[in-house]
Amino acid sequence: MPNGSFCAAFGCSNSSSKTPDKKFHGFPLKNEKMANRWVLATKRVNLKLTPSTKLCSDHFTDADYTGPPKQSRLFPTAVPTIFNFPEHMQPKKYQPRKKRPLSSSGDETVEDSATASFIDPSPSIASEHDCFADKDESLTDND
């Protein structure tokens, strides 16, 4: 590292001269798909990739390394996941839909359509409409 390495992650000021205990990993330039995943993870879509574009070990988990953490090589499938983005760049957190009252009394609730169960038609409705007829009976009647 003749001039030293600098971390290309948003808001990271690590460099090989200031933090010699950090490892600096070059973007996987030979694998365009993985390089794009790294760029998307950093949220720096206009980042110009060169052989000297690097990310420091702070942006990878221990599971991303093949041996002892931060002392060995990254797995070829490793993608950086640890960043300190400002709030407006943070991923939105999922909040489950709230149940709302079905009636004015508030005793019954409407559930999310994904969790609502199917309600069978009552026998009186089923007898009035052919669409609810038992398929097996209609196949065996040859009258």
Image: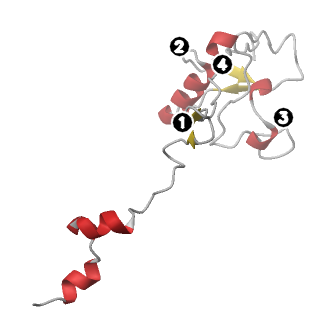
Q: Is residue 21 left or right of residue 79?
A: right
- Does label 2 or label 3 sit earlier along the sequence? 2
Check disc 1 and report the residue beneath it: 103
Kind of residue at badge 2: Lys
Check disc 4 and report the residue beneath it: 90
CA gap between label 2 and label 3 equals 25 Å
Residue 44, compared with residue 26, is above or below; it is above
Foreground: disc 1 or disc 2: 1
Check disc 2 and report the residue beneath it: 48
Name the residue at 27% across, 83% down.
136
Q: Residues within 10 Å of mark 2 (few under 14, many from 20)?
A: few
Q: Residues within 10 Å of mark 3 (few under 14, many from 20)?
A: many
Residue 43, given in percent of the width and then of the height, sits at: 58, 18
Residue 18, given in percent of the width and then of the height, sits at: 87, 10
Kind of residue at badge 1: Ser
Foreground: disc 4 or disc 1: 1
Q: Residues within 10 Å of mark 1 (few under 14, many from 20)?
A: few
Tell me the element at label 3.
Answer: loop
Tell me the element at label 2.
Answer: loop
Which of the 4 quarters of the picture holds residue 47? Answer: top right
